Image (cartoon, rainbow, N blue to C red):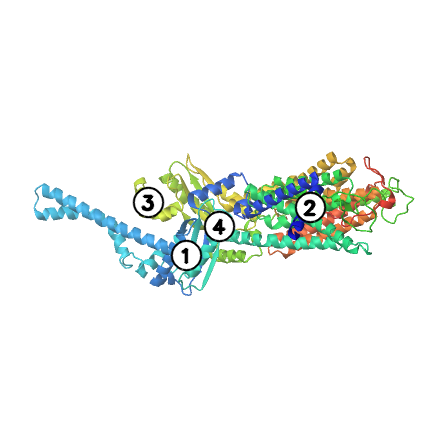
Amino acid sequence: MRFGSVHRLTRLKWLTRLKGLTWRGVALAGLLAVLAAVLVGGLPRVRVDTGTEAFLPANDPTLAAVQQKARDFGGDPVIVLLRYPEARRFVTDHGQLLALLGTEGKLAGLPDVATVYGPATVLNQLAGAAQNFLAQIAGRRDGLRTAAERAARDAGQPPAQVTAAGDAAVARLDLRYAPLIVRGLPVGLPTLSNPRFAEAAMFDQAGQAKPEWRFIVPAPDTVAILVRPRQDLDQAGTQRLVAAIGSTVAGARLATSAVTVSGVPSVTAALAAEVSREGPLLGGLVAVVMLLRYLLVPTAAVGGPSWRRERRAWLMGRLRPLLASLLGSAATLALFGWLGHPLSFAAVLLLPLLLGVGSSFPLYLAAVPNRRRVLVMSVASAAAFAALALSPLPFVRDLGFALAAGVLLTVAAALLLGYRASAVGTTGFGATGFGADGAVAGAESPGLEPNAPASVGAGAIDVPVGARAGRGVRLAALLAAAAVAALGWAVLPRLNVAANPVELASGLPALADAAAVESVLGASGEIGIQLTGPDVLNPAALTWGRAAGGVLAQYFGDQLRPVVSAPGLLGFLGPDPTPGQVRGALELVPSYLSSSVIRPDHRVYLLVYGVRLQDLGAQQRMLAQVRATLPAPPPGYQVDVVGLPVAAARGYQLLLDDRYLANLAGIAVAGLVLALGLRRRWDAARSVVAALLATGWGLAALWALGMSLSPLTVALGSLVSVTGCEFVVLLAEAGRRGHGWLRRGVGYACLTSVLGYLVLIASRLSLVREFGLVLGAAVVLSYLAARLVVWSRPVATATPAGESPVPAASVAPPAAVEVNA
């Protein structure tokens, strides 16, 4: 009986709860279930890809050329630099040569490897080619003798004449090839077990590597192994490949004194690992700062018998804005996961920016009774971020789309959690919480600031903000500020833009390894002089290649380091080879080598040069000079300069060309949204003016300090317009309603937002640290510009149309009026 009674009581309890459910509650539960499914299914799909294509101009011919070169000849190589304690040890020590050959073979067998170029494999290929060459000579000599003797014998000649006919038949062949064979006799047999052959093949008489092999033997005691990955390898595959290369080399029995693994894929793999590590870490630090700024808001003391309940409501009122921000950020990441679109370098900034930007809007919804105003502000912010899509660099565009989506999803999450402004009685400054019906306590009501005299009502007209200063003073201050801003906008074309893809990893050990490799090889990137035509191995095409190489050596010998070229591989044929000689030479040159610069269909060949990844401005000028200096190609042929440095220089030029558009687009779009959405058009105009002033001041400061713009800060106007517009709208609202607490809240929000963005200084990436500093300064400038604009064009206190006044006794300010950065 006791068990039956308990069962009936439990069932009655559940029925009572079910009867208390409303359609709104059921809908909310359903939406939360859908959101949970979206997050659980999308977040595990999020990928980070910091491949070089994210930093290159999309849909541009230079990028298409880079991709085609990778398909034809493999991608940019991972460079394994091996230093030996003694010069030429890798050829004089047979055991080390075999160990090196085995290592190169293992590297070639790794997944996602297109080809491997190393000194041991080159020697092995040369030895095999030499043996085949000698076998062909011997076979041809025997064939000529046999055929001549058979003909003499069939003619009935005596044995002596038959022998003489055989000798005469091979005499011309001996005359052609005997000097070559005699010259090689001191070296011995062409095998890897013969140290003299290996040393003679790689080094000249002075003990230096021969010019054609310096790309794999840069110094007598150093060798380089170039591992070219397959084309279209994604970032996860690149990271696995770099890790596999490192472990393979570490497990090899090589008597080296130093090993360095570098190259563009290695740098991007290290960058991807750092982004994956720092993104959640920095996001967590910003979340802690955001939580502290909610918890540390001044609030009235609570007490009495309901102290625990009020404290719980107080705590929930401060945690829910952070929860809305976290939900919006997580939903944004899940959206990228479901779309299958990888996050690029911007992933390290995404969580900090989304939390910093999105954490404000839930509080706006809780503080401002006019929800339309908050929604218009959020759409304006999203539109300003979406203006970053005008950037030619994919990773900047991705950041803009992600921030725009994050703002909208965070507002949606806040609405889902029941944020709305409601005046439920005065609880003291900063008392914000959720009531039983989901309303926020302490929300803004159209009236005066707390403790104001009750004789001044919500709809009363007070002295306009800024009216204490004379009109002439306000106008002079505005003109002075505008003059400084105009200076910033005027010097925008003179500001340098740092857009080197490899320099994005500045601060990581991988970049130091790249610098070490560059100091040895004389280059850290490569470009290709590409000749395309019906048959690039005909005499005219090869002659053009030799002429082009000579011109580049004459004028750019200190900037371009020859690596390998088609005319260079066939240089032993002399200056004017016949088509037959070229075909014969291709049978002798190992395809392992020829395929590195000659496409199998003989329609494309390369002259590959190493370059230093220097300042992109200087590199762009150098590449333009190279194009102008190259001789005209033969009729029917086309010449082009291709490679990652070429595409990076093109992206740099596009950034320079779009400076004004990138800065003005966000300001214009945000102002347009505000003008269309707000009833008070003057607030939209003030917002545009504030954004123009703040951006101009920031540009002037960068110019005065001698700082460079980055791909992220080159669109400073789009970033500043977000904060400038919201500051102006809130300050104008505070002045219009006579809410001093709202003005103080905006200043407090500016301070805490700056502190939140300074968290980015904890990053190891110099670009992220610099961006955090610039963003923090932009928030301060936006606040100052907003204060100046509202002060110089005063607003009168009044109740906006469509909003009903609330008695002054019910006025209560919000707790955490936050403004995003």
- Three-letter residue code for mark 3: Leu
Residue 534 visible at all: yes
Question: Closer to the N terminus: mark 1 or mark 2?
Answer: 2
Question: Closer to the N terminus: mark 2 or mark 3?
Answer: 2
Q: Which residue is mark 4?
A: 238
- Three-letter residue code for mark 1: Val
Q: Which residue is mark 3?
A: 586
The residue positioned 72% from the left and 39% from the top of the image is: 375
Q: Report the mark closest to the observer, 4 or 3.
A: 4
**Image mark for residue 12:** 2
* Residue toward you, 100 or 603: 100
Q: Are dots 2 and 3 in contact, CB under 8 Å?
A: no
Marks 1 and 2 sit apart, C-alpha to C-alpha, by: 85 Å
Marks 4 and 1 sit apart, C-alpha to C-alpha, by: 25 Å
Residue 529 visible at all: no
Question: Closer to the N terminus: mark 4 or mark 1?
Answer: 1
